[in-house]
Amino acid sequence: MKKSKRRQAEARTAVAVEAAPGKFVWWPWAAALAALFLAFEAYSPALNGPFVFDDAYLPFQTPGLQHLPVWSWISGLRPLLMLSFWLNYAASGEQTFFYHATNVLLHLFNSVLVALIAIRLLELASLKDGPAKPTLGIFAGALFLLHPMQTESVAYVASRSEVLSVLFYYGAYCVFLYRRTERITLWRALAVLALFGAAASTKEHALTLPILLLLTDLYWIKGGIRANALLYGQLAAGGVVAGATVWRVLRAADTAGFHVPGLTPLSYLYTQGRVFWAYLRLLALPFGLNVDPDVAISQTPLDHGAIFGLLAIAALLAAAWIFRKRCPLAAFGVLVFVLLLLPTSSIVPIKDPMAEHRVYLPFLGFALVPLEFLRRMKLRQRLMIEVPALLVLLLLTYQRSALWGDPLALWRDSAAKSPRKVRPRFQLAYAYWQQQNCPKAVENFEIASRLAPPDYPMLVDWAYALNCVGQPGGAIEKLREATKKERDAQAWASLGQIYAQQHQITEALDSLQQAQNVNPSFVMIYSVRGNVYESMGDLAQAKEQYQRALDLDPYNQTFRDALTRVLRRR
C-alpha cells in the first residue's frame, strides 16, 4: 500500500509530456529562434541609446573607478550585478550597445524560463483536468518577452538588477519545479540554494523565493513541504542572513526604508492599495506608460479611496483561494503576483511609490492567469486571440523602446504625463542641455523651479545651461546658491571655471581653493586650475596641476593632452 501511494506521489510530480525516443521535436527550437529575432527587433530602437538617469551613477560612468580591478567593483551589496557591468566595460568600454544587448539577452533567457515554468504548471494543473498543452507555455513566454511594461527593465541599463536577478530567481524555481519526486534530490537542492544566493546577491526582492517554493508545494504537491523540510530550513537560514543585511541598509537609507521623508509604513501601504491596481491596469491595457509617474500619497485610508483598493486586493485574494480548484492556474497566478510584488508594495516605504520595473518579477503570476482560460479553448480559437495580442504588444514595445533610445523624447513624454512633478521636467531640461539646446534647457529649468524649490543638482545644472546661453552672471548666482545647499566640491569648482572664463582670476583661484578644502580628490579642481595658470603663462604651476589631475584620473586623455601641451611650451 505504501509503495502504491509513493508511485502516485511520483506521478503527480513527474513530467507529463515527453518526446518519443529518437523523435526530433522541432517546434521548441523554432520558437527559440523566433524569440531571439523578436526580442532584438522589439528593442532595436534602444540598443544604441545613450545612458540615462541613474546610469550616470554606475561604476562605468565613475572616473577613477572605471579602471580599478574587478574586486573594487564587486565589493558592495550587489556583487554579481556589478560583475556583469565590469564584464561589459572590459569588453566594450562605454559603448552602450553591448550593455543594452546584454539586457535583451537576459530578458530573452527569462522568457524561456517563464515558458518552462508555465509548461510545468500546466502539466500539474492537467493532472486533474486532462492533457496538458505545452504550446501554451510558449505563449506565456512570449507575453513576458513582448509586453511593453517590460521596457523599463530591459531598455534601461541601470535596471540590469531586475533582469539578472530574475534570471537566477526563475532558474531556481524552474529547477525546483522539474523535480521528479516529492522529495528534491541533494544535487537539485544545492542548485536551488546556489541560484537563490545568486539572485539575492543581485537584488533583494529575491528573498521571496522560499515563500514561493512553500506556496508551490502547498498548492500543487501534497506532502511536498514535509518531504523538503531540510531544503526549506536551509533557504530560511539564508533568507535570515540576507534579510539582516537588507535591514541594515534600510535603516540607514533615505530613499527606501523607514526614514523616507513624507512616508510612513501606513501611508505607504495605503498608497500601494491604489498602485497595485494601477499596475494591473497597465498590464491588461498597456497604454500611458510613464518612466516617472506622479502618484499622490494617501496619508489616511480614505485619501484618494485607498481603503477601497486595499479591500479589493483582499477580495481578489479571497476569490483566488475560493476558486483554486475550479481555476487552479489563474488562482495560483494571482497568489504569485501578489507575493512577488510584496517587497515593493507593502509597508516598507520607497521614495518613488510606483515604478514599472517593479512588475518584472511578479509578471510571472500575471502571465499564468490568461492560460487558465486559453487552455480550455481549441487551437484555432486560441490563435485568434494569441496572435493579434502578441502583434499589438510587439508594436507597443517597439514604440516604447524608441522612447528609451532618445532621452529627450523619454523625458518630454514623462513631463507631459506628470506635469506637476519636478523630476521629469528637470530631466527634460538636462536632456536639452546634453544636446546643447541651451535656450530650451534654461526654459525647462525655470519651469522646474516653479514646481518645487530647486535642490543642489538642479542649481548646478541650471548654472551650466545659463553659462551656455551667455549668462555667466546668472550662472554664478545659481552656483553660489548651490554652495549654500550642500558642502560639495563640484559647485565651487564650476564657479571657479566660470570666473576663469570671465578673466576674474582672483575669484577663480579662491573658488578652486574652496573646492579643494571640501574635497581634495575632486579632479576637476586641478584641471581648471591648470587652465588658469596656463592662461597666465605660469607653465610650471600649470604642469603641476595637470599632473595632479592625471594622477587622480590616469586614463583621461584630455588631461594627458594638456600636460603634453604645457611640456612642449616650456
Image (tube, helix red, strand yellow):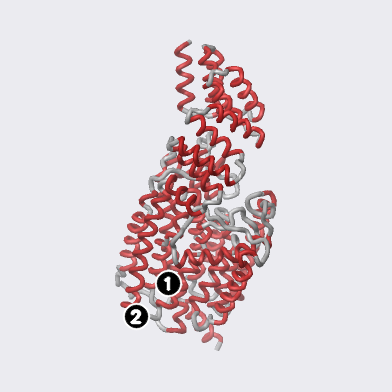
Q: Nearer the viewer, residue 290 or 47?
A: 290
- Whether residue 546 is visible here, answered yes or no, is no
3D distance between C-alphas at marks 1 and 2: 17 Å
Residue 334: assigned label: none
> Regarding mark 2 in the picture, which secondary structure is present there?
loop
Above or below, comparing residue 168 to residue 60 in the picture: below
Q: Mark 2 points at which residue?
A: 378
Occupied quadrant, residue 28: bottom left
Q: Residue at x 61, y 76 (%)?
A: 226
- Whether residue 63 is visible here, answered yes or no, is yes
Whole-percent x and y of residue 351? 61, 53
Q: Nearer the viewer, residue 313 or 333?
A: 313
Q: Which residue is situated farthest in the bottom direction here?
A: 1
Dot 2 amino acid type: Lys
Whole-percent x and y of residue 222? 56, 80
> Regarding mark 1 in the picture, which secondary structure is present there?
helix
Q: Which residue is drawn at 53% across and 34% down?
A: 63
Q: Is residue 489 left or right of residue 383?
A: right
Q: In this view, does 393 lie to the left or right of 555?
A: left
Above or below, comparing residue 298 to residue 321 in the picture: above
Whole-percent x and y of residue 253? 66, 49
Bin the neighbour count of mark 2 within 10 Å (Cα to Cα): few under 14, some 14-19, many 20 and up: few
First in residue order: circle 1 vs circle 2: 1
Query: Which label sits in the foreground, 1 or 2?
Result: 2
Residue 119: assigned label: 1
Q: Quadrant of the N terminus?
A: bottom right
Above or below, comparing residue 126 to residue 410 in the picture: below
Dot 1 amino acid type: Ile
Q: Which residue is drawn at 50% across and 69% down?
A: 365
Q: Is residue 181 left or right of residue 249?
A: left
Whole-percent x and y of residue 400? 41, 55
Bin the neighbour count of mark 1 within 10 Å (Cα to Cα): few under 14, some 14-19, many 20 and up: many
